[in-house]
């Protein structure tokens, strides 16, 4: 243990413990004597494990235990969450990095490079006033941004934890030479609402410290009954024959049909859109989310289903569209649909009750290398995606072979979800709740995949 106000040299900056009663321990390589990781924990159960490269794993609030300083600028480790949250690399580092995964990742991006990208901007709410009461359910919120030298990049707006608007580049910010501003319009819930804003530096690597504004709306929720919006997407017939699948398109169609049947009579209307095979391109997905954003209202429910090829690259999730091509030095990052795009699309749909379902397989045809830590890397990617969206995600990524073999004409995850529509009501209230659906997946997917396919597929719910 060290004095809570002490510090230890770490990577390109200084790591300072910022909370009292923090226990700090170090792990060393007994062969080289080099430090492998630092472990921090507090009596209230928060913890953080961080490597010298800056990769970390943490509890819900653990990444706020440590601040990193670079000259006069300091930031919490949590502000680099989207770049450095890598439990898979922490595990690899503790195992001695036998496959060189940590070294390879650090060559692309580490704490030093993030610090070198410049500080995040400072944000300040200018409209409305903290603690005020709104007279209308929809309000305009405005912030002022101060460039601290790292430029101004993406701005993310959240309402009660859900991302409701993303301004992807500095061009989306109304610029004034002396007073850059950004604004968003959002629909409040009855009672107290928490608006949160985060702005990234121009490199998109370091986020500002989250700023929060509390505002109350004394109105009542809309009496208009909710509608159900479903967007089901699946690709079998990839342009590149090496990526062909058997069940993804059928899974998407079956999910859409099941939701239409289940929702009829329960919702005021059921709005189902399917994109299959050749229609699953970035342009058509963009158009579909735009159209849904125009139709869906805050009181509605939104279900998104995606089946096809996915790939986790350096801790980030990419979906492979139907027209994907193996060209260039880095085709997945160049032609895949990345997390930032999914975040932006989801934010267009204002339905406050929503579930995103990713039933995608990691293709061995895309890259030849596969790590034993792949499952943990996929899990971390889903956690990062969940945090970016602020929405519940159900996922169960699998390998090529099980995805191609399927189970009773479907992927295992899809089959279990369809089965849960009739068998998943554990509490007998005639409603399939998200937690019940997740419970069915948690029990049946590993069981069925292991027995039928010889491969234990493990689902994940991140909410």
Image (cartoon, rainbow, N blue to C red):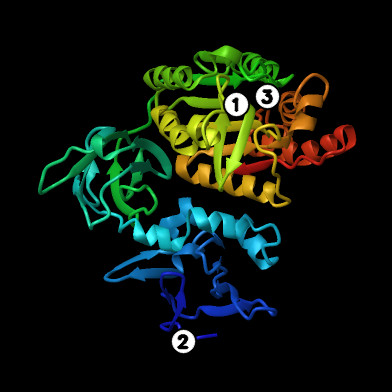
Residue contact at pointers 3 and 1, CB within 8 angstroms: no
Q: Which residue is mark 3?
A: 243
Q: Which residue is mark 2?
A: 3
Q: CA distance from mark 2 to mark 3?
A: 55 Å
- Name the quadrant containing residue 420: top right
The residue at the point 48 percent across, 63 percent down is 63
In the rendered image, the quadrant that contains the C terminus is top right
Pinpoint residue 116: horizontal percent, then vertical percent. Answer: 35, 60
Q: Is residue 278 visible?
A: yes
Which element is circle 3 on? helix
Of marks 2 and 3, which one's residue comes earlier in the chain?
2
Q: CA distance from mark 3 to mark 1?
A: 16 Å
Pinpoint residue 59: horizontal percent, then vertical percent. Answer: 56, 61
* 441 with respect to 85 (left or right): right
Residues 127 and 29: in front is: 29
| Image mark for residue 97 | none
Pinpoint residue 179: horizontal percent, then vertical percent. Answer: 12, 47
Residues 80 and 125: in front is: 80
């Amino acid at each position: 243990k060290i004095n809570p106000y002490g510090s230890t040299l770490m990577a390109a900056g200084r790591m300072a413990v910022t909370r009292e009663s923090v226990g700090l321990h170090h792990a060393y390589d007994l062969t080289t004597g080099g430090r492998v990781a630092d472990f921090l924990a507090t009596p209230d159960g928060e913890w953080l494990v961080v490597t010298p490269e800056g990769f970390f794993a943490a509890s819900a609030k653990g990444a706020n235990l440590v601040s990193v300083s670079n000259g006069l600028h300091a930031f919490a480790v949590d502000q680099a969450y989207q770049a450095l949250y890598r439990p898979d690399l922490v595990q690899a580092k503790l195992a001695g990095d036998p496959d060189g995964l940590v070294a390879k990742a650090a060559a692309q991006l580490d704490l030093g490079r993030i610090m070198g990208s410049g500080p995040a901007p400072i944000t300040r709410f200018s409209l409305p006033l903290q603690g005020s009461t709104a007279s209308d359910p929809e309000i305009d919120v405005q912030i002022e941004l101060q460039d601290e030298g790292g430029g101004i990049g993406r701005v993310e707006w959240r309402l009660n934890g859900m991302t409701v608007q993303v301004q992807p580049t500095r061009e989306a910010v109304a610029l004034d030479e002396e007073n850059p501003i950004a604004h968003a319009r959002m629909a409040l819930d009855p009672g107290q609402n928490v608006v949160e804003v985060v702005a990234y530096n121009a490199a998109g690597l370091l986020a500002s410290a989250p700023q929060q504004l509390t505002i109350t709306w004394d109105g009542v929720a809309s009496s208009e009954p909710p509608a159900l919006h479903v967007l089901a997407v699946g690709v079998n017939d990839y342009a590149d024959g090496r990526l062909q699948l058997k069940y993804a398109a059928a899974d998407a169609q079956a999910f859409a049909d099941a939701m239409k049947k289940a929702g009829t009579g329960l919702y005021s209307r059921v709005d189902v859109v399917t994109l299959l095979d050749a229609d699953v391109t970035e342009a058509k997905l963009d158009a579909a989310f735009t159209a849904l954003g125009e139709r869906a209202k805050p009181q509605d429910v939104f279900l998104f289903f995606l089946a096809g090829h996915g790939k986790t690259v350096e801790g980030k999730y990419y979906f492979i569209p139907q027209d994907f091509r193996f060209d260039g030095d880095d085709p997945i990052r160049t032609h895949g649909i990345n997390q930032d795009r999914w975040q932006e699309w989801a934010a267009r749909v204002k339905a406050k009750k929503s579930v995103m379902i990713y039933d995608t397989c990691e293709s061995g045809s895309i890259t030849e290398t596969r790590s034993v830590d792949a499952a943990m890397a996929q899990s971390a990617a889903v956690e990062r995606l969940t945090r970016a969206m602020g929405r519940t995600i159900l996922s169960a990524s699998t390998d090529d072979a099980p995805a191609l073999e399927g189970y009773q004409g479907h992927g295992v995850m899809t089959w279990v979800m369809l089965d849960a529509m009739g068998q998943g009501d554990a509490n007998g209230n005639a409603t399939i709740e998200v937690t019940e659906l997740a419970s069915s997946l948690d029990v049946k997917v590993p069981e069925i995949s292991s027995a039928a396919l010889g491969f234990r597929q493990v689902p994940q719910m991140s909410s």
